[in-house]
Each structure stands twice: as C-alpha cells, then as structure tokens.
Image (cartoon, rainbow, N blue to C red):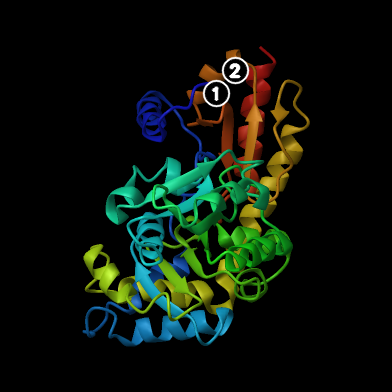
Amino acid sequence: MERKSYYDKIYKTINNLMEGEVMRGFLSDNNSGTHPKILKAIEECNIDHELPYGEDIYTEKAIEKIREIFGKNVDVYFVTTGTAANVVGLSGLIRPFDGVICADTAHINVDECGAFERFSGSKLLYVPNRDGKLYIEDIEKFLHSIGDEHQVQPRVISITQCTEVGTVYTIDEIKRLADFAHENNLYLHVDGARIANAIVSLNTNFRELITDTGVDLLSFGGTKNGMMIGEAIISFNPEISKNFKFIRKQGMQLVSKMRFISSQFIAYLEDDLWKKNAINANEMAKYLEEKLKEIKGVDLCRNVEANILFINIPLEWLEPLEKIYPLYEEYGQIRLVTSFDTNREDVDKFINTIKKISSK
C-alpha cells in the first residue's frame, strides 16, 4: 500500500459521515478529545488575571511538578506543539554546521515538513531504522566525520519513545545510547510524544527511564494522552539550556497566556492522570490485538508494546472498511492507534465491522 495523507483520510471520512454512520476509530490518538480534568484545569485558570509569559502561579507550579518526577535540577520550557518542542529544543543544542542523527522514520525527519532544518539551518543525518529504533552500530559511521571540515559534524542523537512503529526502547537501550553519546561528545534527545505509553509499557517511571539513563533533552508530550495543547522541553543539563529562553522566543513559542498550557500539566501530573490515561490506551491496544488475531486474513505485523498496532488486510476489505472507519496507511501497512478514552465497545464495533466485511 502507498502511504496516504492523514488529511485525505479525514476528508474522506467527512464525506462518508454525510452519507452514513462513521464510528469512533483508530486513526490517531490525536483524534481523541481532552480529558475532563484537563478542561477543568483550563477553566479554573481562566477565573482571574495572571502575569503573562510564564510569570504566573500555574507555570511555577507546573514546573515544580515536573521537577518532582524528573529531578529538581531540570530546566522546563513550555511550548505549543510537539514539533515546536523538537525544533526549539534541538536548535538549542547545535551549531549551524552540526547534525542530528535520527531514524529514517523519526517524526523530525518525516512528519515535520523540514521544520528543524529550516529553523536551525542544520542537517538531519538519518539512517534506516530497525523496528523503529536506532542502534549504536548504525550511528558509529558518523563519527568518522568528526573534525573533518568538509563534513557535517554529528552533535545529537535523537530517538523517539515510543517509536513511530509502536516499539519501545528499554531502559538499558536508552542508557547505552546515552553513554555512547557522551563518550563521543554528543547529546541524546528523546522525542517523547508518547512517553507516557512507554513508561506504562515498561512498568517504570520517568526518572528511571529518562533522568537516570543520562538523557540530555526530552520533548515531553501530553497532547496524545488527554491534554488539549502544549508540550514541554525538559533539559537535564542547565549548561545546554542556558539560552533556551531566547531560542523559544525567536521560535515564536513564548506564549503570552502560558498558564493555559502549564495548568494542563498540573492536572496531567496530579494523581497520576497521565498514567491512568496511558494504561487505558495500552490495554485497549492489547485487547484490539487479541480480537484481531481471531480474524482470518488479518496479519499483525509485530507484537503490541504500547498503543500502536500495524496490520495488513486483504485489499478487497479496504474500501468497504474505509467507508465506516478512517484508516491511515504507513510503511505499507495500516496503522491503528488507541487513545486514553478508547473503550471495549469501540474495539468490538471495529472488530464486528471487519468480520462482516471478511464474510462477504
């Protein structure tokens, strides 16, 4: 299958909706709404006036919350989107002649419209992924260019957790990459758009997976796990982030009414809401996997580790299924993503639809 535009799927779904019923589906965890507790936090911070540009009490409290789970010495900078977190954060680590090593499937390489390269003026050095991951032996070849004035200088290794194909880096894998990076005067960045799902998958916590492994920079995402809007750039080395406030401003990400972003993080981190949301998403992915295994003709491409599945189905099923459910085809497979609010009824309806189509 050819990769098709996410938005083509949306437009097609709208047309189908006008003609008949379209179910809640599994196109993306971006399709889900906002958790009621997050909405309440936004409403509550709207009651009175507050200082702008992050000088408000909500931003202060949110930073305290983040420091409680990652460590007291981390620097925190709120931005609006995951792309902004990646681009602004990475731009703070590099010089114009430096490069960022990433997997060919990385969001910064595939799904951010060249934002990093345009904004930073630096280059992405991508390598073929192995089940979505980067390995040291894939990175070593770039070390030969260090000191060569004709070559882009490797400066940062960037990994995605969970990966774009739904796999999860283990604690040991991240630590090995961090150690390798530091031994070679490189930094390690983690694109954590689905970091909560990875934490739940590994039955660990933020400090063990990120702080203690030696990660230098984290794009901390919550939008895919129940938040409305907003991400956080978290630096574990104050020396590298000393100019981030200027880079964020130049990058048009210094939000004047920042409390509407930071208040969400307070609710997100209180009472482990992030964890409850991710547990549900991951459990529903496993439930969906179990049900799909019962259908002859459905090929699951890999075991489910978090909240993303990839499957293959007979081509003749595709058109009738898309009349009811929007589908996203990527890497020659159909991607299915469960969300914080996915329930068993959603899964059962989807499974029953496929069974009806397969029986014709």
Determine the image quadrant of residue 309: top right
Residue 182 percent location from the top left of the image: 59, 68
In the picture, the quarter occupied by the C terminus is top right
Residue 165 placement, left or right of 246: right
Q: Secondary structure at mark 1?
A: helix
Which label sits on residue 195? Answer: none
Are discs 2 and 1 less than 8 Å apart at CB? yes
Label 1, residues with CA under 10 Å away: few <14, some 14-19, many ≥20: some
Q: Which residue is mark 1?
A: 321
Residue 285 percent location from the top left of the image: 66, 46
Residue 89 placement, left or right of 180: left
Q: Secondary structure at mark 2?
A: helix
Q: Is residue 199 above or below residue 206?
A: above
Q: What's the residue at 56%, 78% (across, down)?
A: 70
Q: Is residue 120 above or below residue 233?
A: above
For this rendering, which residue is in front, 185 or 260?
185
Residue 192 visible from this viewpoint: no
For this rendering, which residue is in front, 139 or 109?
139
Q: Is residue 289 above or below residue 267?
A: above
Residue 181 visible from this viewpoint: yes
Q: What's the residue at 74%, 36% (across, down)?
A: 291
Q: What's the residue at 58%, 50% (across, down)?
A: 342
Label 2, residues with CA under 10 Å away: few <14, some 14-19, many ≥20: some
In the picture, the quarter occupied by the N terminus is top right
Instruction: Give the CA distance from mark 2 to mark 1.
Output: 6 Å
The amino acid at mark 2 is Trp
Q: Which residue is mark 2?
A: 317
Q: Is residue 215 above or below residue 317?
A: below
The amino acid at mark 1 is Leu
Q: What's the residue at 27%, 77% (across, down)?
A: 46
Residue 309 placement, left or right of 224: right
